[in-house]
Image: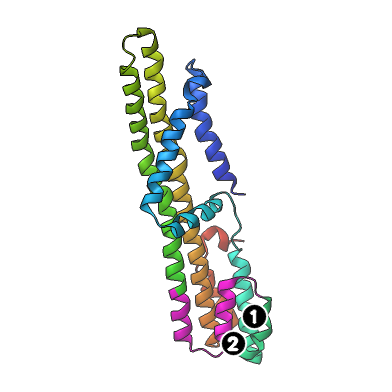
Amino acid sequence: MDILTIIGLVLGFGAVIGGQVLEGGSMHSITQFTAAVIVFGGTIGAVMVNYPLSTFVLALKNAKLALLNHRADPRAVIKNISELAAIARKDGLLALESKVKKTEDPFLKKGLQLVVDGTEPKLTREILEIELAYTEEYHHASAKVFESAGGYAPTIGILGAVLGLIHVMENLADPSKLGGGIAVAFVATVYGVGSANLLYLPLAGKLKLKMREEAIMKELIIEGLISLSEGENPRRVEEKLTGFLRESQKKH
């Protein structure tokens, strides 16, 4: 689990709700089903209009990335590639054929198969970089789904507030209902602004960062496989790939 995302969500929403309570307000005053339907339903509807089904579904699948830490350890990947380089240098590229079936990472497996099949290093790089570029592009588009939701939500919230005020204006003959009616109307704005800045936009930002980390990992794999296929010294391969790591990762 990505504990920082969990803490951030709890702290963000907790601060807003806690502030409401500390100000003497009640939870009932900010809990309005109609406002929630308008804001969340309207936001989702706008996003659906803006994006094709494939991108929308991919965004829902990728949302779990913000809550999970399941990426591979880059140091373990570097060690694995350097070991493969040692085998290839000693016994030849065909000796890696048995390693292909045991490789779990689909991207590394595909690249390793290309190397074993004797594909030219330049062509291998081109094939893998094309897959990397478009995979990153599709995932980036899925992150923009949440970014768009963060843009639509406040506007839908204002729309909900206006609809609520229209209802208030229809009841001007009864002054006793005006205060509560206006308060309820503005709950939609709270939902819109709150969901955008506490959920949608932070979620989009976290997804972009994690997707970039995955892309860097694939760039590391590409560089390692090309070095391996060109018969470079395993130690030099490991030193080269270490350059992809953060300073904190290099110290371990």
**For residue 111: magenta?**
yes
Indicate left or right for 210 with 75 as reference: left
Residue kind at label 2, given as amino acid type: Val
Residue kind at label 1, given as amino acid type: Val
Mark 2–mark 1 contact, CB under 8 Å? yes
Give the labeled residue for mark 2: 116
Q: Which residues are magenta?
A: 103-130
**Relative image position of residue 210 (x, y in whole percent):** 50, 56
> Is residue 145 in sight in this rendering?
yes
Q: Which mark is residue 100?
A: 1
Residue drawn at the location 58% of the way across and 65% of the way down: 74
Q: Quadrant of the C terminus?
A: bottom right
* Label 2: element kind: helix
**Relative image position of residue 85 (x, y in whole percent):** 61, 82
Graded by Cα atoms within 10 Å as few (under 14), some (14 to 19) or many (20 or more), the crowding at tag 2 reads: some
**For residue 216: magenta?**
no
Residue drawn at the location 51% of the way across and 63% of the way down: 214
The residues tagged by marks 2 and 1 sit, at their Cα atoms, a distance apart of 9 Å
Graded by Cα atoms within 10 Å as few (under 14), some (14 to 19) or many (20 or more), the crowding at tag 1 reads: some
**Up-down relation of residue 80 to residue 17 (above or below):** below
Residue drawn at the location 35% of the way across and 8% of the way down: 175
Residue in the foreground of this view, choosing between 71 and 46: 46
Q: Main secondary structure of the magenta part?
A: helix
Q: Earlier in the sequence, mark 2 or mark 1?
A: 1
* Label 1: element kind: helix
Q: Where on the picture, by quarter, is residue 190?
A: top left
